[in-house]
Amino acid sequence: MKHYPMIINGHAIDSHDRLSIVNPATSEVFATCARASEHHVDTAVHAAKMAFTDWSIRPDQERKALIHELGALIEEHKDELIELVVCETGKPVVGLGGVGATMEVMGASIWSHVTADINLPDEVIQDDETAYVAVTRKPLGVVASVTPWNWPLLIAIWHLIAAIRAGNTVVIKPSELTPLTTARFVQLANSVLPPGVLNIVMGAGDIGQRLTSAPAVNKVVFTGSTATGKRIMAAASNSLKRLVLELGGNDAAIVLPGSNLDRIASDIFAAAFHNNGQTCACLKRLYVHESQYGALCERLVAVARGLKIGNGLNPDIELGPIQNEAQRTIVENLVAAATREGGQILCGGKRIEGPGYFYEPTLVAGLTNGCELVDQEQFGPVLPIISYPSIKEAIRLANDSPNGLGGSVWGDDLAQAEEVGRQLECGTVWINGHGGVQPDAPFGGVKESGFGVEFGRFGLEECTSIQTVKIHRQ
Ligand code: NDP
């Protein structure tokens, strides 16, 4: 069975303690990795702190070239990484709407290349005979990254590439459920980067907390649940660490009256169900005008019934298993609550018996805000479809949530859709699409979906502090 060590200060570090990693399509252990102690975490943070001195002043062009090399390394090892993503997440090689392991790995490469080419030049405020005043961007120091199990490689890349591009050093702690792709990437990256610039510790229980509260850590970037994000924010106050918190969402989509349903039904379905709904910016609540409610429900049920579900290593498979049993239980409980609250199960509604954590894609009608399945993030293959009487009411229902990551409006009149979209309380709004992110446009949430953004110039700026330089000339 393959075993993956930690990487600290450029060295492979093993431990007596191991984590067993389960393939969610078979429920069987297929690999192991080293499990960090608190000492390992402290050693990794120290290594990152030591490496910062040289890395932070390394010429920008050299850092840029090294990050391009990381993007190339991912592509060179793509077959191995894709298989590893499928085995640890259950996500199919291609997947529904092409949103699968191949996209995750190739996206990681693209994000690296695009981020490598983003520059943060000085901004000159004054340049005359009395003074020169400029604003420059400086790296923060050691960045701690804690990543989730749904997109382990891509989210790791989102966290760490921007950090090191800006001159910081990193200690990453992946989810204990899916640490392997990140561990392999960090191993590859250390063949290119100086020791200590990028370190990885794997563990469960209290390793994340040890890392994110370490006094030498200057910034924490976390993607995961709101509850854990709040704990990280409280702990970060001890040394006033910078934070970027991407805490998932409960994204609403509004279908405007008079929409061409044949054109949008399968895109809406894919936006809700790709990766089995286990994406922070999946479409999670669908609001449909009462005049088209029945017709759209019918079309979505037809898409659900035609899906190919199974082990994602088979390239024809569109949906794999849910990533872990605990998440499958959350989904099951929400569907049970929906039934109690008067929801009608249009299709699905139960686990698929046999090995693996499979669950039928499930559509639920007849609910509204105030029902558990509508109010809570399901993070699984189940979608509540809610009827609304007026656009004003649809906007009210969409905004009636503590979350605010993304949102979307679907309709034939783009100007009307944009006008409605701009009224949604969320970090990104999509028109006739949902969840599409890109490496040069900022992405982040409002309200309890977190704060701070990733990607592009805005994301890179989050990895820096401002230094004002004033040169007196008289
Ligand atoms: P969590 O959000 O609880 O995150 C777990 C990770 O956070 C682990 O790596 C854990 O490490 C670390 N952690 C836990 N407590 C702390 C702390 N106090 N300080 C620092 N790190 C900490 O994820 P779960 O896997 O439990 O998922 C729960 C829910 O989160 C899901 O049901 C889903 O709704 C949502 N989710 C959202 C995602 C998104 O993309 N936004 C992704 C995945 C899940 P350690 O065990 O070592 O402490």
Image: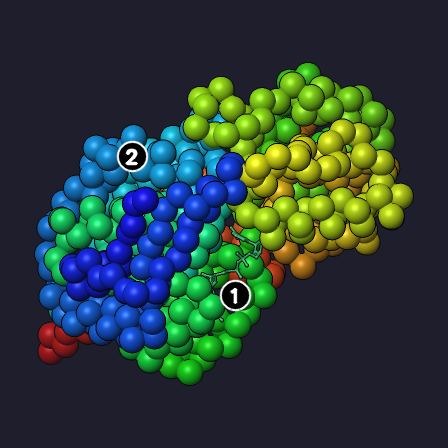
Residue at the spot x=67%, y=51% of the render? 330
Q: Quadrant of the N terminus?
A: top left
- The x and y percentages for residue 273 are 60, 34
- Residue at mark 1: 229
Q: Residues within 10 Å of mark 1 (few under 14, many from 20)?
A: many
- The x and y percentages for residue 260 are 70, 19
For discs 2 and 1, the disc positioned in front in the rendered view: 2
Residue at the spot x=33%, y=54% of the render? 33
| Residue 424 visible within the image | no
- Residue at mark 2: 80
Residue at the spot x=70%, y=42% of the render? 285
Mark seen at residue 410: none
Farthest residue toward the top?
262
Q: Nearer the viewer, residue 105 or 58?
A: 105
Q: Is residue 63 above or below residue 410?
A: below
| Residue 82 visible within the image | yes
- Please, what is the three-letter code of the amino acid marked with disc 2? Glu
Instruction: Name the N-terminal-most of marks 2 and 1.
Output: 2
On screen, residue 237 versus residue 427, left or right, reads left
Q: Nearer the viewer, residue 375 or 77?
A: 77
Q: Residues within 10 Å of mark 2 (few under 14, many from 20)?
A: few
On screen, residue 425 versus residue 52, left or right, reads right
Secondary structure under the numbered disc 1 in the rendered image: helix
Residue at the spot x=63%, y=56% of the render? 403
Judge: label 1 CB < 8 Å from ligand 1: yes
